[in-house]
Image (tube, coloured by chain):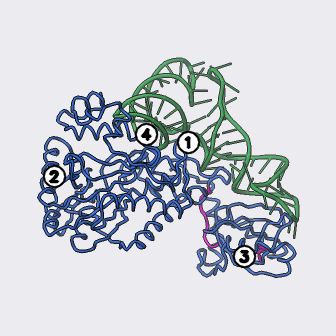
Chain colours: A blue, B green
Amino acid sequence: MSAHADNDLSEQRRAKLRAWRARGDAYPNDFRRTDFAADLHERLADKNKEALAEDNVEAAVAGRIMLRRMMGKACFLTIEDMSGRIQVYARLDGLGQDAYADIEGLMDLGDIVGVRGTMMRTMRGELTVEATSIELLSKCLHPPPEKFHGLVDQEMRYRARYLDLMVNEASRQVFRLRSTVVSAIRAFFEAHDFFEVETPMMQPVASGAAARPFTTHHNALDMPLYLRVAPELYLKRLVVGGFERVFEINRNFRNEGLSTRHNPEFTMLEFYQAYASVDEVMALTTELIHEVAARTGRQRVTVDGKEIDLSADFDVIAMEDAVCEYTGLSLDDVWNVDALRRALGDDAPDKRASAGELLFALFEARVEPHLVMPTYVTGYPSEVSPLSRANDDRPEIVDRFELFVGGREIANGFSELNDPDEQLARFHAQEARRAAGDAEAMRIDHDYVRALEYGLPPTGGQGLGIDRLVMLLSGASTIRDVLLFPLLKPEGGGHGD
RNA sequence: GGGUCGUUAGCUCAGUCGGUAGAGCAACGGGCUUUUAACCCGUGGGCCCUGGGUUCGAGCCCCAGACGACCCA
């Protein structure tokens, strides 16, 4: 990448490193930091210039040089550690000739340094470490991005995420937020007597969702393996085993295109609760999102200029009603193949599609983008929900919901289908679709059906996309902004090696 | 997969009508012992994404490609 083809500038820095190496260990690990920048700011907040001068507070800080102001026989450095920034003041008189010359001759913006000194305030009141020693701990051999604008180039922000994080505070905040989200979710489920499990990422049958898997091969067993598209069928096996409340936060892999909403690997939360109805799962989902929004301080977020209150109750609407509302169809039409096809126009799928499939297609095409305020959509057609339990009164729909916020699907939950014979029949229906050309139709998992034959208690479960939740809370418009290392095409258009 | 826009110094960006490539930051040299996006003076730094084409002459116009951003599917 062009960012690293800085031959002259990095040669200058390498020359300084060579000079530093000649003095001894150029990459020492004997500097003992005693203070973080933020702690010093907090601890000494109420000490004015005079009080600090009297107290003689010693400090040892370390971090990267972000700014530097040389003034002949004195200089200011701004260094940054994981907690924030702190200013360093170095004087020729205070450090001595040789040590002061090192700052000018060996150190550059971007270098990692350790500083010992005494806390003071400048005439303008800024808390500052007046250095008694400064040592180079790790040389930065490339010029860092521009100090004021940071790193703007999107491609380089994704390809060299370390540079993005080094200079863009906004980017760091997104990933701190993400960490808080995950930890809030864990705390929530632990408080509700769930426990966390890990199920296989590599599966002999990739089932549990309508998606194409990545394929790999196990040499010793000489068998194909698939990266999972969902953990669902394994989690429900655990409920069969008596783990009545489980959750998993982990990666799924789907072999599909890249977009602002899709990355081939993404993170899902799934949880299952025995003896819970779909309504209880919905209530738990609302409670979860309320809790995460509160823990992250993001109860009010803005999507496409519209403010969304994540602490309020969420709307609920049946898919049939939602389709009528946004397409003008009547309730009599929503299971009528001809009426649905007319409404879909050019967006209609292949000719063999059933009424339920068409209704779902129409919902996706015409309704989803309008669901900006948090909204549960219920009553999904059975054909597009092969793992959901049929509604007791109306077998053509299932007891399932999806939660939409900002026009995007955030979560998907349902009352689990636990009749093994019905499940096998649904799998066979999926297989028929596959035979008819649907490459994403769900695979039959016979071992899962056998697990159901031992008895899955009535159960409710739900899956929630962590990346999309973080997008919502952070205001990110692309999934790449909430993934530390999003998948990109290789540089230069070639293959990796 | 389709459309639109973009790619110029290490970084952030200008570049007029087609006529020898510009700024700020960063670097290097000089000045400056309380600055803070420090400041002042000076110097160096370019595969203008790649490959073709048009032209006396292309960063600029045309064609193809690579990568990215946005929109659509």
Disc 4 to disc 1, how far (Cα)? 14 Å
Residue B14's image quarter?
top right
Q: Is residue A134 left or right of residue A477?
A: right
Q: Can you identify the residue that label 3 sits on? A: A43
Q: Residues within 10 Å of mark 1 (few under 14, many from 20)?
A: few
Which residue has dot 4 on it?
A370
Residue that carries the numbered disc 2 in the rendered image? A426
Q: Which residues are magenta?
A: A129-144
Which comes sooner in the sequence, label 4 or label 1? Answer: 1
Q: Chain of mark 3?
A: A
Q: Could you tell me the amino acid type at mark 4? A: His
Q: Nearer the viewer, residue A67 or A170?
A: A170
Question: Looking at this view, is B60 or A224 the one in front?
Answer: A224
User: At which x and y percent is residue A227?
Assistant: 27, 59
Q: Tell me the amino acid under the disc marked 3.
A: Arg
B66 is higher (above) or lower (below) than A345: below
Label located before the other in sequence (3 or 2) = 3
| Residue type beneath disc 2 | Arg
Q: Which residue is mark 1?
A: A305
Q: In the image as oriented, which residue stretches furthest toward the front?
A: A393
Q: Amino acid at mark 1?
A: Gly
Q: Nearer the viewer, mark 4 or mark 1?
A: 4
Of pointers 3 and 1, the one earlier in the residue sequence = 3
